[in-house]
């Protein structure tokens, strides 16, 4: 997308480069040959993605220079924290003061924050999380594109709209040429530097076919590739890593084995966690997290979910609302077991989780505002970003297929042209002072 800027390589240390963005130093892993000090590069997710000519880079940076510092000023203003309100609850102020100093909070204190309902208290809580986001990540924000290549799935998850329970869904599977064309448009037309290739667990693609697609994308359209194909086995993960994939999006959804097995027929949490742990050992960047609002879930379960994401070395935390599809078994039993919750209340509960995640892993993790959260409210993306989040995903699946990737009903952006998504996202991020420098800051 157009919301990305090049940086200048200032130093090379083995496979690590130090990149300068208008005087701000950041670091990235480099797997490309012929990168030298003084070169301009694009980077995403901690990796150098491609070189860019000095002429083109300097032209882009000339346009960005003034804007870059203006954005920093906006972000600093919005993330400013004042815990000196004498009318506020003293216990809350003490907890938030310790959190703002990066001190570890007890489980009891974190659960207290998750239980907050009062709007004034929630505002202080969210401001503290946003302060920590700015303190350690500055105003950087990453925006990924996602291509949903198939909605076939052999799994019988009781709530998911593309599970094998949904007999009313029109199924599709993109051809290799269609996937390559979608990737080309995302990278070359819209300027995305990171793509997620996603599907159900679809045996219609062999691992070798997926590897071939990834290799061709990497060779033709330099980008950081995340995969999200479910549990494809350790050999499959190895092959796709060798093909050029560098990230894995796989949520564990619940750290409670009983809850997991109640909604994932015939699957085990142990298998899911084994995939995530082995993927990290292979070298994948991990995007993982849970669902908020699954029937039977307690606040303790949610807190355990956040800690588990950290234990799994998550590069990015992904927590979204539980939204069962109406054409799945769960929709029939949910009203009796789990009375519907107002969308605003669901948004608030998820945003609290994002803020807790920022407090628990303030120094390392990126935190995603999911499309599911945006589905509940048009303001959800802004709310999440002001509570510690710093990542978004835009849907670059061809419009002809997008409505059929119906994991839950009425998804945000499902019929929205990518240009509209980009325009609204850039407008939102600029209003919040966020800049496209998705690398670890050297403090």
Image (cartoon, rainbow, N blue to C red):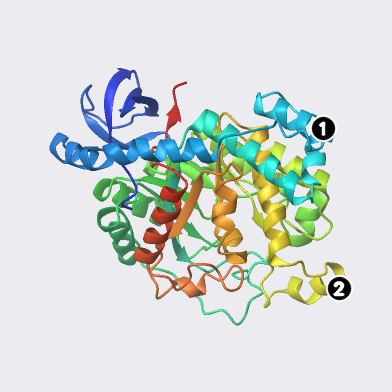
Mark 2 touching mark 1, by CB under 8 A?
A: no
Q: Is residue 96 left or right of residue 171?
A: right
Rounded to the nearest whole Å, what is the CA distance between mark 2 and mark 1?
40 Å
Q: Residue placed at 62% from the left, 80% from the top?
A: 167
User: Residue lying farthest left?
Assistant: 55
Q: Position of residue 212 (x, y in %)?
A: 34, 52
Q: Is residue 304 above or below residue 167?
A: above
Q: Is residue 181 above or below residue 92?
A: below
Q: Position of residue 428 (x, y in %)?
A: 45, 54
Q: Residue placed at 26% from the left, 58% from the top?
A: 189
> Which mark lies nearer to you, 2 or 1?
1
Which quadrant holds residue 81? top right
Q: Is residue 98 left or right of residue 426?
A: right
Q: Which residue is disc 1 drawn over?
A: 90
Q: Residue placed at 33% from the left, 24% from the top?
A: 17
Q: Position of residue 103 (x, y in %)?
A: 70, 23
Q: Nearest the camera: 400 or 61?
A: 61
Which quadrant holds residue 132? top right
Q: Is residue 197 left or right of residue 85?
A: left
Q: Which mark is residue 388?
A: none
Element on which disc 2 rests: helix
Q: Nearest the camera: 3 or 31?
A: 3
Tell me which label, 2 or 1, sits earlier in the chain. 1
Q: Which residue is disc 2 drawn over?
A: 336
Element on which disc 1 rests: helix
- What is the crowding at mark 2: few (fewer than 14 residues within 10 Å), some, or many (at least 20)? few
- Residue 284 visible in the current orientation: no
Q: Position of residue 390 (x, y in %)?
A: 51, 43
Q: Is residue 54 left or right of residue 214?
A: left
């Amino acid at each position: 997308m157009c919301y990305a800027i090049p940086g200048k390589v200032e130093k090379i240390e083995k496979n690590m480069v130090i990149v300068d963005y208008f005087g701000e130093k950041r670091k990235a892993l480099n797997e490309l040959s012929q990168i030298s000090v003084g070169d301009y590069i694009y980077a995403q997710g901690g990796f150098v993605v491609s070189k860019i000519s000095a002429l083109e880079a300097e032209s882009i940076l000339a346009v960005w220079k003034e804007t870059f510092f203006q954005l920093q000023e906006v972000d600093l203003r919005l993330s400013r924290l004042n815990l000196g309100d004498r009318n506020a609850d003293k216990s809350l102020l003490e907890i938030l003061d310790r959190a703002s100093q990066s001190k570890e909070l007890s489980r009891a204190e974190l659960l207290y924050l998750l239980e907050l309902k009062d709007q004034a208290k929630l505002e202080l809580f969210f401001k503290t999380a946003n302060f920590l986001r700015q303190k350690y990540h500055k105003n950087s924000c990453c925006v990924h594109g996602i291509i949903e290549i198939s909605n076939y799935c052999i799994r019988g998850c009781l709530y998911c709209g593309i599970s094998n329970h949904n007999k009313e869904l029109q199924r599709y599977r993109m051809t290799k040429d269609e996937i390559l064309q979608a990737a080309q448009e995302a990278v070359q037309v819209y300027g995305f530097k990171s793509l997620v290739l996603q599907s159900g667990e679809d045996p219609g693609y062999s691992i070798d076919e997926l590897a071939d697609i990834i290799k061709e994308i990497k060779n033709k359209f330099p980008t950081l590739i995340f995969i999200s194909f479910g549990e494809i086995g350790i050999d499959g993960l190895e092959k796709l890593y060798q093909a050029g994939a560098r990230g894995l999006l796989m949520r564990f959804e619940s750290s409670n084995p009983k809850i997991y097995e109640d909604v994932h027929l015939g699957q085990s949490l142990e298998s899911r966690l084994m995939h995530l742990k082995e993927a990290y050992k292979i070298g994948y960047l991990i995007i993982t997290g849970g669902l908020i609002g699954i029937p039977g879930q307690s606040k303790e379960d949610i807190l355990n979910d956040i800690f588990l994401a950290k234990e799994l070395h998550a590069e990015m935390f992904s927590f979204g609302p539980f939204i069962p599809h109406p054409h799945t078994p769960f929709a029939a039993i949910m009203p009796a077991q789990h009375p519907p919750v107002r969308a605003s209340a669901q948004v608030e509960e998820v945003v609290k989780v994002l803020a807790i995640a920022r407090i628990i892993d303030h120094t390392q993790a990126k935190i995603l505002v999911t499309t599911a959260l945006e589905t509940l409210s048009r303001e959800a993306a802004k709310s999440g970003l002001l509570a510690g989040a710093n990542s978004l995903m835009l849907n670059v699946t061809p419009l002809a297929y997008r409505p059929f990737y119906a994991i839950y009903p009425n998804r945000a952006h499902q019929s929205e042209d990518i240009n509209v998504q980009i325009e609204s996202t850039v407008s939102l991020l600029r209003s919040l002072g966020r800049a496209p420098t998705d690398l670890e800051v050297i403090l």
